């Protein structure tokens, strides 16, 4: 009995285009607005950490390409950093004004 090579399945021969891996950027934000280093990943693999104060880090944050995780578990995606920090500042002011007897 003979077998033909055509009956064997060839790797990558499905004709479907291969998808490019997507780089994701994440960073944690403290309650006072401090941004921890931006972690660049592909899937679960960490590629590198980017300083948020560097030119590349600022451009990623300004473009809204970084998913920001806050200390209360909330996250913000696709928003420029200045908008997010303004919202955080207004939230802190509202909480502060709710307790006028507390020292500042």
Image (tube, helix red, strand yellow):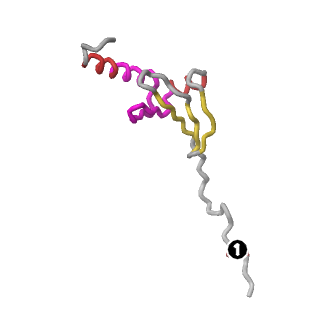
Label 1 element class: helix
Q: Is residue 14 above or below residue 51?
A: below
Where does the image place residue 101, in percent across and percent down from the top left? 25, 13
Q: Nearer the viewer, residue 23 or 73?
A: 73
Q: Report whether 87 appears left or right of 35.
A: left
Where does the image place residue 27, in percent across and percent down from the top left? 51, 32
Where does the image place residue 92, in percent across and percent down from the top left? 34, 20
- Which residue is at the far right? 2
Q: Residue 15 lies in what quarter of the image? A: bottom right
How many marks the image carries: the answer is 1
Q: Report whether 51 appears left or right of 69.
A: right
Q: Is residue 4 above or below residue 70?
A: below
Residue depicted at x 40% and y 36%: 73
Q: Report whether 3 appears left or right of 50.
A: right
Where does the image place residue 70, in percent across and percent down from the top left? 42, 31
- Which residue is at the far top? 104
Residue 72, magenta (yes or no)? yes
Start-end of magenta stretch = 63-90
Q: Residue 85 lies in what quarter of the image? A: top left
User: Which corner quadrant holds the N terminus?
Assistant: bottom right
Residue depicted at x 68% and y 73%: 8
Residue 24, magenta (yes or no)? no
User: Which corner quadrant holds the C terminus?
Assistant: top left
Residue highlighted by disc 1: 6
Q: Residues within 10 Å of mark 1 (few under 14, many from 20)?
A: few
Q: Nearer the viewer, residue 24 or 93?
A: 93
């Amino acid at each position: 009995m003979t077998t033909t090579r055509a009956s064997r399945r060839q790797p990558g021969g499905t004709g479907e285009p291969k998808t490019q891996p997507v780089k994701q950027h994440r960073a944690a934000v403290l309650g006072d607005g401090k941004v921890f280093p931006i972690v660049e990943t592909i899937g679960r693999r960490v590629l590198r950490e980017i300083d948020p104060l560097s030119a590349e880090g600022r451009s990623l944050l300004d473009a809204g390409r970084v998913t920001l995780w806050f200390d209360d578990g909330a996250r913000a995606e696709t928003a420029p950093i200045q908008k997010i920090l303004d919202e955080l500042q207004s939230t802190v002011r509202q909480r502060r004004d709710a307790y006028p007897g507390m020292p500042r």
